[in-house]
């Protein structure tokens, strides 16, 4: 077998959800968009539902339809992109709750599906999704008369607890929702960790469930083991990889492992990237290619049959640093060629 | 609908294959590993087979098994990772030709599947896959007695026609295969464009089929249109996106479109990235988020319903430059949430 093995610990996902719910002390939803950050929305959601999660969020109605098929009736499924043109049938058929982002979406929703549950998304400063304050003040009374199930907003800087933007967005959320008798939610993982002032009636963690920062106490969820195809000796001065990108500074043993950027191992990973073998770090050398990565295993005893990129010895966020990105992208980029196995 | 539409022009893939075959004037295989660089190996291969391609290459035996199911008996399917432990059943069952990379693989192959077709992969300086010269000289007579169907190697610097490595690898390939009466192949897309000295008996283009550099005359294959979720006005000094990463230098209209790094739109895309509307470029602002990208559409008349990232006005390689990578990675990263449509 030359495909790598991605092991996903569903028990750890459930433990992380429970730990965040414990911190929040309010209803704790689960964000399972982007196929549960690449970890299989169906399996993740089933396990979280069994553990007590009653509310899930996806990005697009298409994801919601698939999730409803998995979960069956009962759990609530919110859609962050709201009610897009052409989505009425999906929203009604799969009993989704669109998080309405604009007056246009509001009109579309009440015309197509009067009485169908929906939430409202307000912009409190991120300027990405949600109604602007002016839009909201014009629409507020009409919207509230339609009995929204939730009013939500999203923090732009929650990964940085000291950022003044957090308090600013919270104040604006308070101002915009003053006197409104509808459940409110402001926080994903980052906000959940900012303290009870950010929890309102519901938190909706995503990345923390999957073992990623900013939830430093998360249990790791993902392990990625990549088989070695072959090992070769190179002499001092020999080059390795595309564009001769690495030159051996000493006689070395180079292992070629069977995964690359087509498997989501971001090509920007370069100097300083390592893999591990029984906890021992070995440096990636040369460029990451589409299906292959070359690793200097000179300092290992014997010939490893596989090397580990993500696991107990290197977190998703460590690997993200190798590529100059964030753990979220490492997770969602995980490719389709892996042999996936699940632990519960 | 909030999912983006990825249009794949299979007619262009076939045209690119024919154009490369015309240049090569030798047998022209098709590399369809990594799900045909993210564009659907099944459809791509069926169309290329109908156009006359008789030989395909994948990275892993698992991909070969799926491809055989699609193509049925007849076309030859080579596996670059060779004969890995545990793959004998797949190789035999799907009639795959492993490209043997080492003495270990050679022994494994002749023990498990005596008489089953295989190729030989030699390393000519990339130090990634293939037998080393010393290994090869020890094994050569034994290996040739087993009637390999192909001897191949891979160029490390073919995208750079002036790189001295190209001629060096060609000379080494000549040396290693002198007097050998087995079909030979050295070149993928880049080598195909280096001239007939690099063509030998077969070329095996990959990225050129899919419209990517270094095949500058390739027909574009991919179009990516992303729906707008909402458009908002921001005033001078307002910030947009995670970490407040963009500040409006003037009153602006910001469109939020429905795709992000979870769809393979690499998060490193930043300053200078653009999308287009009817051919007019509009700048990406703020950080690419998981499911969303924000774009400054102030200079467009009216409110666009969608924006285009890849297409007639911006190639895959242009988008790669935005992210500091290569077109290959943009293609293989294309996500699973897109609504895919095929042109023939």
Image (cartoon, coloured by chain):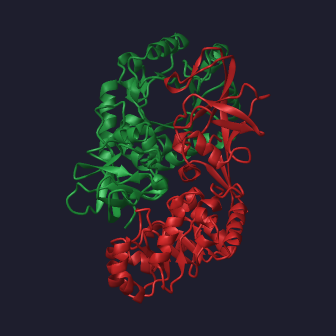
Chain colours: A green, B red
Does A183 sit left or right of A8 as displayed? Answer: right
Whether residue B4 is visible here, answered yes or no, is no
Q: Quadrant of residue B140?
A: bottom left
Q: Residue furthest right?
A: B301
**Residue A227 coordinates in the image, percent (x, y):** 34, 61
**Residue B326 coordinates in the image, percent (x, y):** 56, 49
From what the image shows, is residue A52 above or below residue B189? above
**Residue B172 coordinates in the image, percent (x, y):** 47, 71
**Residue A253 coordinates in the image, percent (x, y):** 29, 60
Residue drawn where x is 55% and y is 26% of the image? B241
Q: Quadrant of residue B89?
A: bottom left
Q: Residue furthest left?
A: A301
Residue drawn where x is 59% and y is 31% of the image? B271
From what the image shows, is residue A31 above or below residue B62? above
Residue drawn where x is 48% and y is 85% of the image? B180
Question: B205 and B157: which one is in front?
Answer: B157
């Amino acid at each position: 077998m030359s495909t790598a093995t991605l092991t996903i610990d569903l028990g750890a996902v459930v433990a992380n959800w429970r730990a965040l719910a414990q911190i929040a002390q309010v209803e704790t939803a689960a964000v399972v968009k982007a196929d549960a950050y690449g970890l299989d929305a169906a399996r993740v959601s089933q396990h979280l539902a069994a553990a007590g999660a009653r509310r899930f969020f996806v990005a697009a109605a298409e994801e919601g339809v698939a999730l409803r098929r998995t979960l069956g009736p009962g759990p609530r499924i919110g859609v962050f992109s709201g009610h897009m043109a052409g989505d009425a049938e999906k929203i009604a058929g799969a009993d989704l709750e669109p998080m309405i982002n604009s007056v246009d979406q509001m009109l579309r929703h009440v015309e197509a599906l009067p009485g169908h549950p929906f939430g409202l998304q307000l912009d409190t400063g991120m300027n990405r999704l949600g109604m602007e304050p002016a839009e909201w003040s014009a629409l507020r009374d009409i919207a509230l008369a339609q009995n929204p199930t939730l009013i939500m907003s999203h923090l732009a800087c929650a990964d940085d607890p000291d950022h003044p933007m957090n308090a600013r967005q919270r104040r604006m959320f308070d101002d915009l929702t003053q006197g409104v008798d509808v459940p409110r939610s402001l926080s994903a993982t980052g906000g959940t960790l900012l303290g009870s002032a950010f929890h309102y009636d519901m938190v909706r963690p995503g990345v923390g469930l999957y073992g990623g920062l900013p939830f430093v106490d998360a249990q790791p969820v993902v392990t990625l083991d990549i088989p070695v195809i072959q090992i070769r000796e190179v002499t001092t001065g020999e080059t390795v990889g595309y564009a001769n990108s690495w030159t051996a500074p000493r006689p070395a043993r180079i292992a070629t492992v069977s995964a690359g950027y087509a498997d989501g191992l971001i090509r920007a990973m370069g100097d300083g990237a390592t893999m591990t073998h029984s906890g021992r770090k070995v440096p990636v050398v040369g460029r990451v290619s589409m299906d292959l990565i070359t690793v200097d295993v000179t300092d290992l005893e014997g010939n490893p049959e596989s090397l580990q990129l993500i696991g107990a010895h290197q977190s998703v966020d460590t690997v993200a640093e190798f590529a100059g990105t964030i753990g979220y992208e490492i997770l969602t980029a995980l490719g389709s060629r892996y042999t996936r196995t699940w632990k519960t």
